[in-house]
Image (cartoon, rainbow, N blue to C red):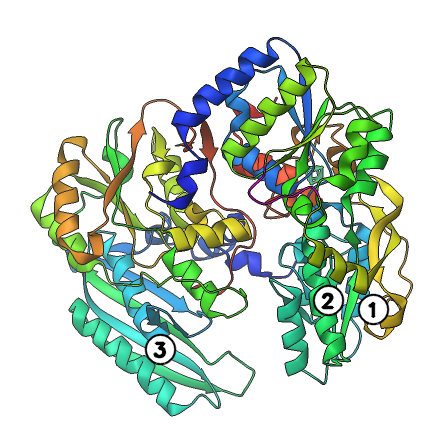
Amino acid sequence: MSTERITLAHGAGGESMRRLIRELFREAFGSPELQPLADAALLELDSRQAAFTTDSYTVKPIFFPGGNIGKLCIAGTVNDLSVMGARPVCLSFSCIIEEGLPLAVLEQIVQSAAEEARGAGVSIVTGDTKVVARGECDEIFITTSGIGVRPFGKGLSTDGIKAGDAILINGFIGDHGISVLAARGNLSMQVKAESDCAPLNGLIESILTESAGVKWMRDATRGGLAAVLSELAEDTPCGIMIDESSVPVRESVQAVCELLGFDPLHIANEGKVVMVVENAEAEKILTVMKRDPLGAHAVCIGEVTEDSTGIVRLKTPVGTVRRLHRPAGELLPRIC
Amino acid sequence: MNVFDQWRNAAVAKPLAESIRSIAGERPIRIMEVCGGHTAAIYRFALQRMLPGTIQFLHGPGCPVCVTGTDFIDRAIAIARAEKTTVASFGDLIRVPGSTLSLAEARAAGSSVEVFYSAMDALEWAVHHPDRTVVFLAIGFETTACTIAAALSEAVRRQVKNFRILSAMKTMPGALHALLSDSRTNVDALILPGHVCSVIGSQPFEFIAHELRIPCVVSGFEPLDILESVRMLSCQLVEHRCEVEIQYRRAVKPSGNVAAQQIMEQMFEPVDMTWRGLGSIPASGLGVRREYSAWDAASLAGKTAPSKEPPGCRCGDVLRGSIRPEECSLFRKACTPDRPRGACMVSSEGACAAVYQFAGAEDEH
Ligand code: SF4
């Protein structure tokens, strides 16, 4: 029996969490659907292609510029389904509430969740409520699960990725993490940042409908863009080259990062999808993205390369090339 | 176009690197930087790759988390065990391994440890938790020390009696004197810490150029700042000059920031300080002045068992610039930022963490 205890690093999306998931959960549960450790499990239900996912939300504070835990828990689960190429259909909504939470606050959270679900075209069809004594949880924790159908079939996997494919993102990175951090009020500085929290199913569905060029995608949540790209590089027989100057970062977000020693590439997003697309289709897909307000700042940030297999390289703004690793260590707890 | 682009511009960086190449020629130059911000920037922008292999960066004792000794962590953990006591810390410090635990592990085991971005925030927290004794772990160089002095002065003014300071604050000039006069240190030129100099000015470092005959440049933290500083240092070496020049003119004056110096002097006094890797250096630290001893946590810290350094960790050698992080046998194996064995792997400004995070195997000589 190990004497080790769980520390915040185990939930930070870095190496410790990966180890926990791989060595404890995946080992113990063992089901083949869990093996890929993707954002959602791909299932065949009665010969229909489906996707199933679940996520818990513990963001602190529960209200932040650009959203609140209610909006976040819908957008996050919708996005986990969407990036697997699924059309989200219905969601569950379970909450653990701390005794003493003002009812008005709960109402506001639930209204946001309802509004967000309506906007995304999904229904909330089941749920659960538990109340615990003061101090036994922090205001409210929410878990949502979701089911989606897959009208676009399999298609999306790292298998078809080859050198020359373009890597796209639908806009500015780091907004969510920095806005939540600023909302905690312990930064002693004024920060103009709003969370990018938004359901991306509409954007993703238009792209998949108009182009067959999308090969793979992920939403860049905890661990940021760097974590998604590292995962991609490890799963393909190719390398990844990113041009740091082309990655969109708002000046306010960059400024906070510089001051606190964070890399914007490591900061969480809640409305950003990273896509690997066939080079010839890249322009067209960018045009489709830009038509949607959630993709107004979409750009190509890099490409898949033949050399340097399994690793992500980054061209710095001064023209040098270095490796980009996934973030390690405890970054920002309770960011989503 | 973003405000940072002007300092991170390949069109300027390339010719600058070329001019360094032509000034320095084949001459081997060992440049030490003594601020973690510089270490991080050198790796983050892979500056070594623009420069001839004969120019080498050595990383000195410039990361405040790294130079904090194991005994300080042990004392903080002992304090956190006391009834109704909360230890308030900067984020990175809580992950530094102590003799048996880190503060993060102590927190997981039930001690009260809170993380803050500034001493002022910790003071406000203390005001809102009058039933607890809040002990702020004061680490850092002059840059941070002046903000901690401001918080302490505020605590005194408002008579916040449940707020105390446990100091491991350090001052750079004395430590550099000890390090650079040690015959084992082999450094040709020095990049001086821009933030520290914005507070105390460049004058307190003049002795390095005049007595120790080592050229110095106070540098900013953007890649173009650092390249420009390397060019200035190369010129001094080639021209046999030893001066303290200021590259970081937009932030640093020779006399520094007088108001910041005054508040530090009001609240703190010089004390002997233990540096990880350098040992105890006379008058190289700042302690709470005797008249404010009611706010000093030094008396709270009972005796702890003698501290043990993590077996195999070579942070001391790394901090003196005598080995590179990759030369530690635990590097990237038993020691990673996720499970750091030593202090230099914790903060993003630590040399081991910077090499881990930004360098690939191809940069690790
Ligand atoms: S790699 Fe780890 S153990 Fe080795 S010197 Fe660096 S911090 Fe210490």
Quadrant of residue A302 within the rendered picture: top left
Residue under disc 1 on the same chain as residue under disc 2: yes
Q: Is residue B90 magenta?
A: no
Instruction: State how far apart marks 1 and 3 are (Cα).
Output: 45 Å
Relative image position of residue A334 (x, y in whole percent): 48, 65
Q: Which residue is mark 1?
A: B297
| Identity of the residue drawn at 78% across and 41% down | B204
Task: Give me the residue at 41% from left, 37% from top.
Answer: B6
Tell which quarter ligand 1 is in.
top right
Label 2 sits on what residue type?
Phe
Label annotation for residue B136: 2
Question: In the structure shown, which secondary structural element does the residue marked by tag 2 occupy?
Answer: strand
The chain to which mark 1 is attached is: B
Tell me if residue B198 comes above or below residue B39 in the rendering: below
| Image disc number at residue B188 | none
- Label 3, on which residue? A94
Magenta-colored span? B248-254
Residue B51: x, y in percent? 54, 19
Q: Residue furthest top?
A: B26
Label 3 resides on the chain identified as: A
Q: Mark 3 belongs to which amino acid?
A: Ser
Q: Residues within 10 Å of mark 3 (few under 14, many from 20)?
A: some
**Left or right of B336 in this view: B244:** right
> How far separated are the C-alphas under marks 1 and 2?
8 Å
Q: Which secondary structure, mark 3? A: strand
Viewer-nearest residue: A212 or A179: A179
Q: Nearer the viewer, residue B233 or B258?
A: B258
Which residue is found at the position 21% from the left and 52% from the top?
A295
Taking the view exactly as shown, the residue that stands out farthest to the left is A210
Q: Position of residue A122 (x, y in %)?
A: 18, 70
The mark total stands at: 3
- Looking at marks 1 and 2 on the same chain, the residue that comes earlier in the sequence is marked by 2
